[in-house]
Every structure is written in C-alpha cells, then in structure tokens.
C-alpha cells in the first residue's frame, strides 16, 4: 500500500504542477489582447485627430468659397451704384452691400477659427504619432516577453504531460478512476497528509485506531477522511522532528505545572 500511495502522491504532485502551468497559459491570450488594445487605442487617437483635421480643412475651403462669393456680390453691388436712378434704390443697394460685407466678416471669422483649429490638430497629430511609436515600442518588448513566457509554459506543459503518462502507468486503472473522481470533487487535491491527528485538507480529526493502522508498514488498507472523502496518508516524523515535538510537549507541561 505504501508503494501505491507514493505513486498517487507522485501523480498528485504532477497534476498540481499541471494545473499551475495551465493557469499560466490561460493568462497569455488576455495579456496579448490587452497589448493589442493599447496599440489600437493609440491608433484610434491618431486617426481621430487626422479625421478632425480633414474635417477642418473641408470647412476651411467652404468658408474661403463663402468669402469669395460674398466679395463677388459686393463688387457687383458697387458696380450697380452708378446705374441707380433714385435715392431709395441707392439706399437699398447700400443695404445689400452692408449685409454682404457683414457676411464676409462672419465667414472670415469662421475661417480664422478653422485655421486656429487646424494648427491645434496639427499639434495633436504629431503628439499622437509620437505616442503611437512609443506604445508600439513598449508593447513590442512586452509581447516578446509574453511570447517567450508562453513558449516556456508550453514546454513545461508537454514535459509534465509526459511525466503524468509515466506516473499513471504505475497505478491500477480502477484506483486511477477513483483518484480522478476525488480530484474533480476537491479542486485537484485527492490526497491529504494526516498532521497532528487531523486531515491536512479539511482539518477533521482522524480516529486514533485509523492512525495506528496507517502507521503499520504492512497495512494493505487505504483510508479516507470521513468528512472530505480524500485519501489520507501518514508520514512518520523524522527523529529530529519527533525530538522537537517531545521537547515542546515537555515545555508546555512544565509551564502548566508552574
């Protein structure tokens, strides 16, 4: 039984390391996606600045055309002044000239606003281009590190899968099925050491006669925790550990007598 327990412990050790490796591998896609998202966000910021700049250029051209159009109207109105016959018509024409000049002023103000905005977007574009290059450089290094770590984890996974194959070859099929059922029930831990007369997993007290039987070198029985149902095992403490425990017990007894 001791040999079988050791085989199960070896298997559990491999499975615990396998779970750790799988957990590591599961994090890499998220890390890479976050890296891609940071680059995409930086590109989106640059694209937004370029789009705003393009819209500003279009508006600027429109306002330039408006200015030219109103100036043409002013010239036409002024040309017509020499043909006016009445004061009323003259005043009406001057009113049209004034309105056109007001529109020219408004269009020129809007044009100036767009020119100022265009300069601001130029600065934003340059800043966004620099920021994008910085982000891409940082993420390139980060991605290289993540890929290297993933390659190591994938190798570890392959090595541990091979080690598990060797480990299960030493375990009878029915016992392996039993082990797998407990593993699924208890989050990857099927065996627990008895320490201080308690199950090392759930802390439930193990009956004295069970411990006595477990300590027998020729015991052929497999024991389970009555509470969590894990397979329990007992490891005799080393001489130094036993001496330390005895000394601690004696010290505690002396303290109580005092």
Image: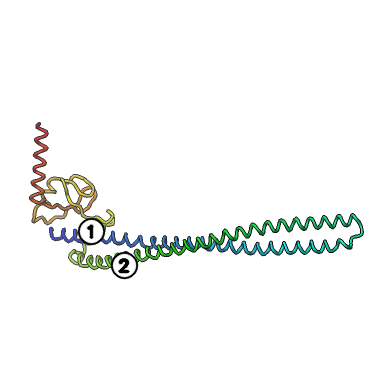
User: Can you tell which mark lies on residue 258?
Assistant: none
- Please name the residue shown 17% across and 49% down the image: 194
User: Above or below — where is 200 with respect to 50?
Assistant: above
Give the residue at the far front of this rendering: 82
- Please name the residue shown 18% across and 46% down the image: 198
The residues bearing labels 2 and 1 have C-alpha atoms spaced at a distance of 30 Å
Which residue is identified by label 1? 179
Task: Please tell me which of labels 2 and 1 falls first in the chain.
Answer: 2
Residue placed most toward the observer, 114 or 82: 82
Image location (x, y in percent) of residue 258: 10, 31
Q: Residues within 10 Å of mark 1 (few under 14, many from 20)?
A: many
Residue 222 vs residue 120: left or right? left
Image location (x, y in percent) of residue 36: 43, 63
Circle 1 — which element?
Answer: helix
Image location (x, y in percent) of residue 7: 17, 61
- Please name the residue shown 71% across and 56% down the image: 106
Which residue is identified by label 2? 151
Circle 2 — which element?
Answer: helix
Give the residue at the far right of this rendering: 85
Question: Do residues under tags 2 and 1 come within 8 Å of each other at their CB atoms?
Answer: no
Res. 5 image quadrant? bottom left
- Please name the residue shown 60% across and 61% down the image: 118
Residue 134 vs residue 5: left or right? right
Residue 209 vs residue 71: left or right? left
Residue placed most toward the observer, 54 or 213: 54
Give the residue at the far top of this rendering: 258
Image location (x, y in percent) of residue 213: 11, 51
User: Above or below — where is 248 with respect to 56?
Assistant: above
User: Above or below — where is 252 with respect to 168?
Assistant: above
């Amino acid at each position: 039984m001791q040999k079988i327990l050791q085989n199960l412990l070896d298997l559990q050790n491999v499975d615990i390391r396998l779970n750790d490796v799988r957990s590591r591998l599961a994090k890499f896609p998220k890390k890479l996606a976050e890296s891609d998202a940071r680059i995409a966000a930086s590109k989106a910021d640059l694209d937004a600045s370029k789009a705003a700049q393009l819209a500003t250029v279009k508006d600027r051209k429109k306002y330039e055309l408006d200015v030219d159009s109103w100036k043409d109207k002013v010239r036409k109105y002024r040309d017509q002044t020499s043909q006016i016959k009445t004061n009323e018509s003259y005043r009406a024409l001057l009113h049209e000239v004034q309105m056109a000049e007001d529109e020219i002023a408004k269009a020129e103000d809007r044009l100036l606003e767009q020119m100022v905005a265009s300069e601001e977007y130029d600065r934003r574009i340059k800043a966004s281009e620099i920021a994008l290059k910085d982000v891409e450089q940082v993420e390139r290094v980060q991605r290289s590190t993540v890929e290297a770590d993933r390659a190591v984890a994938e190798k570890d996974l392959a090595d541990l899968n091979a080690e598990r194959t060797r480990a299960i070859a030493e375990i009878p099929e029915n016992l392996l099925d039993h082990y797998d059922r407990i593993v699924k029930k208890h989050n990857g831990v099927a065996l627990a050491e008895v320490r201080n007369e308690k199950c090392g997993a759930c802390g439930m007290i193990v009956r004295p006669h069970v411990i006595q039987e477990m300590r027998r070198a020729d015991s052929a029985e497999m024991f389970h925790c009555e509470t969590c149902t894990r397979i329990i095992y007992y490891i005799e403490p080393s001489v130094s550990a036993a001496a330390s425990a005895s000394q601690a017990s004696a010290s505690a007894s002396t303290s109580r007598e005092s």
